Amino acid sequence: MKTHSGVLVIAEQCFGDIHRVSYELLGKGREISQKLGSPLYSLILGGEGLNVEELNYCGADKVFYMKNKCFEKPEEFLFKENIVRFIEEQKPEVVLIGATSFGRSCAPRIAASLKTGLTADCTDLYVDEEGNLIQIRPAFSNNILAHIKTITIPQIATIRYKEFNEGKRDTNRGINITVLDAYVSLNDKSEIIEIFKDSDFDITEAKVVVSVGRGIKKKEDLEMFKELVELLGGHLGASRAIVDAGFIGSAHQVGYSGSRVKPKVYIACGISGAPQHIAGMKEAELIIAINSDSSAPIFNYADIGYVGDLYEIIPKMIQALKNNK
Ligand SMILES: Cc1cc2nc3c(=O)[nH]c(=O)nc-3n(C[C@H](O)[C@H](O)[C@H](O)COP(=O)(O)OP(=O)(O)OC[C@H]3O[C@@H](n4cnc5c(N)ncnc54)[C@H](O)[C@@H]3O)c2cc1C
């Protein structure tokens, strides 16, 4: 007799907007729930006015909308406390959480409170012949893919944004929403005094990304890349090497420990192509690489490669784009 059943997707919202990772988790969650022969639930915590029926349209059999003003701010303690109480009561066998900044912070707290395992940053999930959930994630700096089976229940996994396709939206799918109140709405452990927003910059949504690596000599040289990005209507990305060097903020980092991007065009400038960088950009539709070393691994992934000095190539690209305006 199973004590737990159902796949639960924890949908994320930020200041009233449902994060798209939620729809991706529903897409994968549907597949997993069908294999397990169990229902797909979604839990969302938020204030008034969320478009929660979208979670039904994109795959959830049943949506639990925990509605309370206290969830208007990303108060981790309150989210964690309420999610744990919900899971204890609902008893899902699998819980999927987005590996966003918020999800990465909440998931370990939830797993620890439930005394269960957590597989972080999964890149794939499947159900084996014995009905076990197998969680796949890169390990040892991306050199192996670990297949992990959690022996404790519920099995909790965080999944990176842009890893799966969104659940197919179908407005004919029946709406089944249960509104709940918060179990706990008062946070006496900590208080959010002020919220800082790092502009509206979100590299994961960019159609064009121009990324810069250790091929640049100094921070000021980023200016020419900013000009190129402006002309192309894109976003500026970076390898970890120049983020670590303090040339640019971590919101720009592409890769295994940065953001995963899927733009139409990705231009890698002075980036060698380490596996940890490739992990974040290999899904781009068109990859252009500029590197002075013809044996740089980035060329193995590039659709178009320029062997040369970026200090010569980038100004020429800028000039050509200006001439074509
Ligand atoms: C656990 C872990 C997580 C990591 N996560 C990430 C991550 O998320 N993202 C990431 O990027 N890295 C990550 N790294 C680091 C990664 O392993 C590499 O060290 C990093 O990607 C190297 O950055 P780079 O290509 O800019 O620098 P380098 O490897 O030093 O390459 C610089 C390149 O520039 C070229 N070059 C030099 N001068 C010029 C010029 N004038 N014109 C043209 N080309 C030139 C060189 O030929 C060279 O190929 C991670 C590492 C670990 C261990």
Image (cartoon, rainbow, N blue to C red):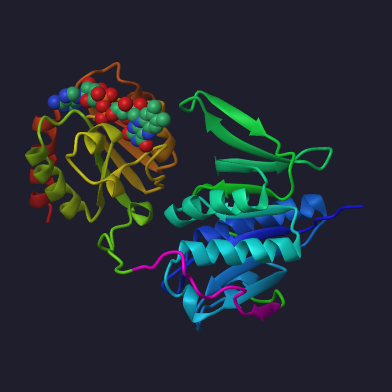
Q: Position of residue 182 (x, y in %)?
A: 59, 76
Identify which residue, 142 or 312, lies in the foreground.
142
Q: Is residue 67 left or right of residue 306?
A: right
Query: Residue 166, position in %: x, y?
Result: 56, 58
Question: Which stretch did the figure color magenta?
Answer: 176-192
The residue lying at 13 percent from left, 37 percent from top is: 314
| In front of the other: 254 or 49 | 49
Give residue 39's position: percent from left, percent from top: 77, 62
Ligand 1 rendered quadrant: top left
- Can residue 59 be seen in this snapshot? no
Residue at the extreme top: 295
Point out the residue furthest to the front here.
188
Tell whether position 116 is magenta.
no
Q: State yes or no: residue 181 in magenta.
A: yes
User: Which is the main secondary structure of the residues drawn in magenta?
Assistant: loop
Q: Which residue is at 12% across, 52% downward?
A: 324
Vertical comparison of 44 with 103: above or below: below
Give the camera-side residue of 64 and 84: 84
Tell whether 35 sits left or right of 108: right
Q: How many marks?
A: 0
- Tell me the residue at 67%/46% (across/down): 116
Location of residue 212 by image quarter: top left
Rendered view: 19 above or below 207: below
- In this rendering, the answer to whether 116 lies above or below 302 is below
